[in-house]
Amino acid sequence: IKWTEGVGWHEARLTPYAPLSLDPANMTLHYAQEIFEGLKAYRRPDGSVATFRPDANAERFQRSARRLAMPELPTELFIEACDALIRQDRAWVPAHGGEASLYLRPFMIATEVGLGVRPANEYLFIVIASPAAAYFPGGVKPVSVWLSENYVRAVPGGMGFAKTGGNYAASLLAQAEAAAQGCDQVVWLDALEHRWVEEMGGMNLYFVYGDRIVTPELTGSLLAGITRDSLLKLAKDLGYESAEGRISTEDWRRDTENGTLTEVFACGTAAAITPVGLVKSADGEWTQGGGEPGEVTMKLREALLDIQRGTAADTHGWMHQLG
Ligand code: PMP
């Protein structure tokens, strides 16, 4: 779908997958007005297909657009575009039962040609799709994380809450540092004190204190994950307490060592829920939950996947069924 100043959204088209042709002076290539989303379509027991909270993705896309001075795509158009592509590619939505899905990647770029630094006056919204295999084909395995003190992903007043490519470019070196330390993922800390836990590379974090789960509050510099928000609600359905709060790296280590912090997990569209088994930082390392997936983590994981696969009641009205 195109957007042009004075005209608005127009020319919605479904076309075969093909390379884009971009002018070398395309403004996105120079000034990075680019935003994206990620969501999945799941096969249900009756063979129909549904996406998980596409309205929440549409709203986050609008917040990202505002921050990058781009036009907002109305929620109905966002969902209609995703649905049209899924209908076209519905054979690619994997069979019901496992954790495989069809991953959708809606995104928007500026298409105006010019080298002046200002918001572009033409944009293109595109959705592409790709089948996604189960994240843990051999069973859920805890990840190891590296607490990044050398780099920050986002600063107050910056774009951390927006889903824009620049945030991911900023994370690549820290992710490489984590890998060099033998860790699977980087954990971001706040920019000012390098102390408050924000999120993981591509997932939000939860801290399990017995039957209470806590996730870092939305400071503006971390992504408001849709899985994160869903778990705040789903945990209550399962009889846990859930809250947003502030967790420092000292809290993390101390509470693990004194046994009050029983499990830590990460959550996001890609892997649903992933336990954290080992934490490393410049000051040392510690294991989490004995390096095994915790009970609360796995209960929440199954409850979420059951809703997504259509085998549990969708009491929050999260599933958008295509029929
Ligand atoms: N944080 C970051 C930086 C991410 O890229 C993602 C994945 N979109 C998340 C958190 C989790 O968000 P969601 O639950 O909406 O997938």
Image: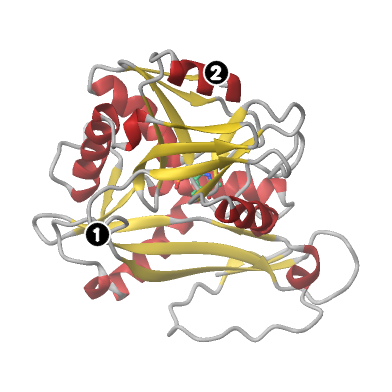
Q: Position of residue 171 (x, y in %)?
A: 65, 53
Reply above or below: 236 against 71.
above
Which residue lies at the image location 70% right of the left edge and 44% below the top edge? 159
Mark 2 crowdedness (10 Å alpha carbons): few <14, some 14-19, many ≥20: some
Q: In this view, does 153 lie above or below 236?
A: below
Residue in the foreground of this view, choosing between 300 and 118: 300
Residue identified by numbered label 2: 251
Which is nearer the eye, 152 or 123?
A: 152
Does residue 44 appear anywhere in the picture? yes
Amino acid on which disc 1 is placed: Pro
Q: Does the residue labelled 2 lie within 8 Å of ligand 1?
A: no
Locate the N terminus by quadrant: bottom right
Residue at position x 35%, y 43% in the image:
142
Which element carries disc 2, helix, strand or loop? helix
Q: In which quarter of the image is residue 103?
A: bottom left
Q: Which of marks 1 and 2 is nearer the N terminus?
A: 1
What percent of the width, then of the height, locates residue 24?
78, 83
- The answer to whether residue 72 shows anywhere in this view is no
**Up-down: is 21 above or below 314?**
below
Query: What numbered label is drawn on residue 148?
Result: none
Q: In this view, does 237 lie to the left or right of 110?
A: left
Disc 1 element: loop
Instruction: Give me the C-alpha separation between circle 1 and circle 2.
Output: 33 Å
How far across and down, in percent of the image, does residue 164 sit?
A: 64, 55
Q: Which residue is drawn at 27% across and 33% down?
A: 300
Image quadrant in which you'd find residue 138 = bottom left
- The residue that disc 1 covers is 137
Which residue is found at the position 24% from the left and 59% from the top? 137
Residue 223: % across, % down: 57, 41
